[in-house]
Image: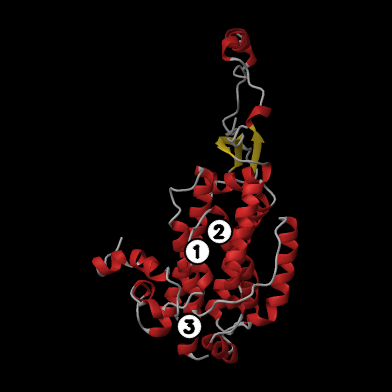
Amino acid sequence: MNKEWPLWEVFIRSKAGLHHQHVGSLHAADSEMALENARDVYTRRQEGVSIWVVQSNSIIASNPEENTSFFDPAEDKIYRHPTFYELPDELKHM
Amino acid sequence: MSKSIAYRYTLQIADNSLILGHRLTELCGHCADTEIDLAISNIALDLLGQSRMLFQYAASLSGSTEDEIAMLRSEGEYVNCLLVEQQNEDFSQVIVRQYLFDTYYTLFLKALSQSSSSDELRAFANKTIKENAYHVRFSRAWLMRLGDGTQESHDKTQASLDFLKPYIQELFIPSQVDTAAIADGVGVDMSKYVDQFHTTLQADFAEATLSWEAPKYHVSGGKDGRHSEHMGFILSELQYMQRAYPNSEW
């Protein structure tokens, strides 16, 4: 029997309006405990207003060995960046 | 409101938090998992924070200082209930002790926030209700996991409950100070809440597959300063710094 508790990934939203960000991982026996552990480990200093936890093995990750085929083809597609527009000075947050 | 009654009544509440908090700090660095270590330490810090708030209030009522009251009384002058000084025998005993106290505290804080004549104690209760709600959630969830877990965790939790149940009654039976504080208006009469407490316990024990029989005897005396054999050991560690280096500060 595997006595290790499963691993969970923790996502915290630091304040309303922002998106959840991955902050780390932890061990817990069930989803309820994962949420409580996340609260105790990652929000002790008022880091967040919302927590998501997801079991790590539910995350499908890209394979680092396939990085060349996954990501390199975007390298020379500079026209995909909207950098060729002239923006008025009044526009601050682009 | 009588200052001396309010002072002694406040100490009862403060000492519960101080001693239970100290018991939990003993586990810091010793839990089986980092996550549980942090959870227990968080609760310990909450409890120590509660006791500070109350010791500051007690100091304002008595003219002495927070440190003197918290750290320099003799054993017989501490008035916490016996439940909170019981040892960290194993994790199940930590959890059952915490669950019993948190469940009692839920009722106590609500009553205090609604009907104490002291502005400070009502403010304390209102602030602490939120902290306690999380503590109950933690200890209750673990009671379920351990009670309804493996045969071993169930047996240990049942043994812890059987060991600790004689200490429950003291929480609700008024001491001399309680009686004076209730008459004064600053205190609340917890004997009115015994049935409600046991109704909660029965429902939770049923869910945790733990059995309950009324204890054959009760132990009390902590609120009058008569403590179990553990208290001297707690105080020797708790008071060491203040006694070895008087008036030391951070």
**Residue B26 in sight:** yes
Secondary structure at badge 1 equals helix
Q: Which residue lies furthest to the left in this view?
A: B245
Q: Label 2 is placed on what type of residue?
A: Gln
The one nearer the camera, A77 or B172, is: B172
The answer to whether B28 appears left or right of B190 in the picture is left
Q: Helix or strand or loop: what does disc 3 sit on?
A: helix
Q: Where is residue B28 in the image (x, y as percent from the top left)?
A: 44, 51
Q: Establish whether labels 2 and 1 are both on one chain.
A: yes
Please tell me whether mark 3 or mark 1 is closer to you in this view. 3
| Residue B194 sits above or below residue B145 on the image | below
Which residue is label 3 attached to?
B224
Q: Residue B93 carries which label?
A: 2
Same chain for mark 3 and mark 1? The answer is yes
B149 shown above or below B169:
above
Label 2 is found on which chain of the structure?
B
Q: Which chain carries label 3?
A: B
Q: Where is residue B12 in the image (x, y as percent from the top left)?
A: 49, 78
Instruction: Identify whether B68 is placed above or below B90.
Output: below
Q: Name the residue that disc number 1 marks.
A: B47
- Residue A60, given in percent of the width and then of the height, sits at 67, 23
Q: Which mark sits nearer the N-terminus, 2 or 1?
A: 1
Q: Earlier in the sequence, mark 3 or mark 1?
A: 1
